[in-house]
Amino acid sequence: MGRKILLDKAHIEGIRHYDVYRREGGYRSVEKALKTMSPDAVTEEVKKSGLRGRGGAGFPTGMKWGFLAKPEGVPRYLVVNADESEPGTFKDRYLMEFIPHLLIEGMITASYALGSNVSYIYIRGEYWWVKEILEVAVQEARNAGWLGKNILGSGFDCDIFVQPGAGAYICGEETALIESLEGKRGNPRIKPPFPAVKGLWGCPTVVNNVETIAAVVPIVNDGGDEYAKIGIGKSTGTKLISACGNLNKPGVYEIEMNISVEEFLYSDEYCGGIANGKRLKACIPGGSSVPILPANLLLKTAKGETRMMTYESLSDGGFATGSMMGSGGFIAMDEDQCVVKHTYTLARFYRHESCGQCSPCREGTGWMEKILLNIENGKGKMSDIDLLWDIQRKIEGNTICPLGDAAAWPVAAAIRHFRDEFEWHVTNPTDALKGNYGLANYAKPLEIAVAP
Amino acid sequence: MLQTLPFGGDGGGYMADEKKLFTVTIDNITVEVEPGTSILQAARKIGGDVAPPAMCYYTKLKDSGGKCRTCLVEVAAGSAADPRPMPKLVASCRTNVMDGMVVKNITSDRVIDARNGVVEFLLINHPLDCPICDQAGECHLQDLSYEHGKGASRYEFKRRTFDKHDLGPYIQLHMTRCILCYRCVYTADQVTNERKHGILMRGDHSEIATYIEKSLENDFIGNVIDVCPVGALTDRTFRFKNRVWFTKPVDAHCNCEKCSGEVQLWMRGDEVLRVTARKDEWGEVKDTSKGETGWICNTCRFERKKASDWIIEGPSQINRHSVISQGHYENGVKPNETIKKVMGGRDPKLLMNIKDVSEVNQVELSEIKGAATSESFKQLKKGN
């Protein structure tokens, strides 16, 4: 059994409420930090832990905190990004729904480290009931003296507010989130300046994912070195993976980052294999924005090594033969799934969610969707595949925020790895409407290239 | 200055006054600019082809820019201190120069490729109705398309369309042509008292709107027409009256209690067909003689349509390459008459003078109320 440090107590009856959470050892990290540590010491522990942002980009959290500008007399803010809208990702919802005090505890500790006296949870509007759970939890924490003025007599003031979004994927992008939090239209800002210098209301701001902030609790409790012992290399600690798709046991799993993708996918402790005895065709290992991989490249890297559930191993081979850890939205697709239809669905999503601020993303996402719909409906031309490739290439990297990249990568990866399926759709339009391409060669072992 | 200044002496103040300039190299041309200048402004200082095109950036509007992505450039070296290249192309309008920065604009294939892509994206949903668009001839998208567009489109789907809206008696919004540069939004925020329009919806269905068709009524709201890079916001008092290249721009002023009164008149004969703010070579509103931004008020723009309302200063300077100067009379170099030479010394014979047979040129355009259409022509003729 893998070690669980975030969700180990999530199943306990009543843990959602303060009394049980406190009885089970909650808020120890706040006590430890406020009574025995300086703010910089907390940041130092987080740096030592090697914790990386769990929202998708995997940027080292300690380093991000270190970048926070600290001018005199200017307030600083911590904003927790709970706008979890990536298709396939639902780990933060689980955490906030079952063990909300873990997030609040992590926020108080992190706010202490960053010097934030007012911290925000920006939660997506669709999670309205989770927002209510969080608001109850915040009130309980306030009543118990963990929030407010002079917490534990340390002289540190902190309060937390929960702000719901209005249903826009783009507001998960940190600067769009800040704009939305300020009450404006959720358009990403042009960087620089980065939020660490000029964020919420023009003040230095750190935006972290829910899981990242929750992980601060075990880091402070047990020490950064202890946390860094879990996992492989620069992928330290545990990661929540929300597994979905054609799996026997979809759900949210906390894994130590030292297991292989095969173990995660097939062992009974985790996903329990592909549902209905079918075979795996393709998988998106990190949420809808990361490149899709065919089965043969998912379990083994192009070099023939076993692929592990770590940041490095999942991205091994770059975009040519690898993918990304992303936000941990693990989507498995069996042999009966159609990659073209799937790519179309994602393109439709990104078209709908583009904020419309910069031209490549605004116009390109809609164009890609229309072409993919044509191919899916058997009206495609062979040249459309090359056109799609050209469009995604011209979106990627040329936009204000990463949504353009997130829209381009799935299309690029689908064409890169499943081009014959696209071509089959074009050459067999009537068959494509009735059936699908099937597994083909996508699970056959790759010929291992001899190392140069 | 080799003289050593005494420590703590007056020289300290002198040194502080001396601003250190940053040296930037853009397309192998080196220029010195003040710290805090954007790459785009540095490139405009060099001028010519080196200046990246800008569809959304507007010098006079704070926070504008970064959206259209036509001004993307490659930074081959970040600065003298840190000469690493920037991995992505950057929006030159919103990226400040560093000392020793090396920028590639038209010398970079990546930039040209990306810019062609952006132009294609901007055009897939643009109606390309230049033949009936009042902006044609002074349209930035038109210029950009000539430079970077292709002859044929790869887009095979129905284009996005919107209904035309009248934003009050003076301004028409034709959203189908809009490229969502946000300039009009910033103008309303920064020039007028209150913004009543903005962006509705998101993505490729986003639109400039007043939510429920309201009219925009503010003394300075007419400036949104000047900042619009395309024909999305047009002057209803000038609608279909004339092509801009048939009108002659002259600088004029009047004593206006609301604005500087320094404007540009677009005349045909003695008629004032249109009044706009004066614009510089980048198509942006110029500063007035008092050094303020030359926004003009609605009264000057829409109401003062008689030549007698104005004190005419003289013809405006127009770029020789602009289509507007095709019928121009100033700075013009008259080419030698070649027809006679080609025709063996004979003069060309005029077969028919269009002015003798066309009724269009017999009507005073300024007498037409509203848009000039065949209907209004007939009515005017009847009235005569």
Image (cartoon, grey):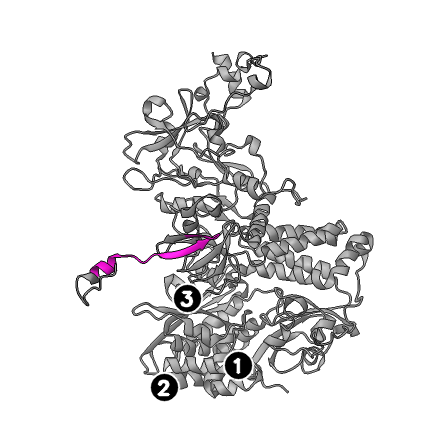
- Name which residue lies at 65% across and 82% down: A259
Asked whether B28 falls inside the magenta stretch, the response is yes
Q: Is residue B238 depicted above or below A195 in this figure?
A: above
Of the 4 image quadrants, the one containing the N terminus of chain A is: bottom right
- Name the foreground residue: B367 vs B146: B146
Q: Marks 3 and 2: same chain?
A: no
Count up the numbered dots.
Answer: 3
Q: Which residues are magenta?
A: B13-30
Residue B103 position, x and y percent, is 47, 56
Q: Is residue A346 left or right of residue B111?
A: right
Inter-mark Cα distance, 1 to 2:
28 Å
Q: Position of residue B136 (x, y in %)?
A: 52, 33
Could one spot residue A25 in this view of the protein?
Answer: no
Residue B45 position, x and y percent, is 40, 47
Residue A35 disc label: 2
Residue at mark 3: B81
What label sits on residue A14 in the rendered view?
1
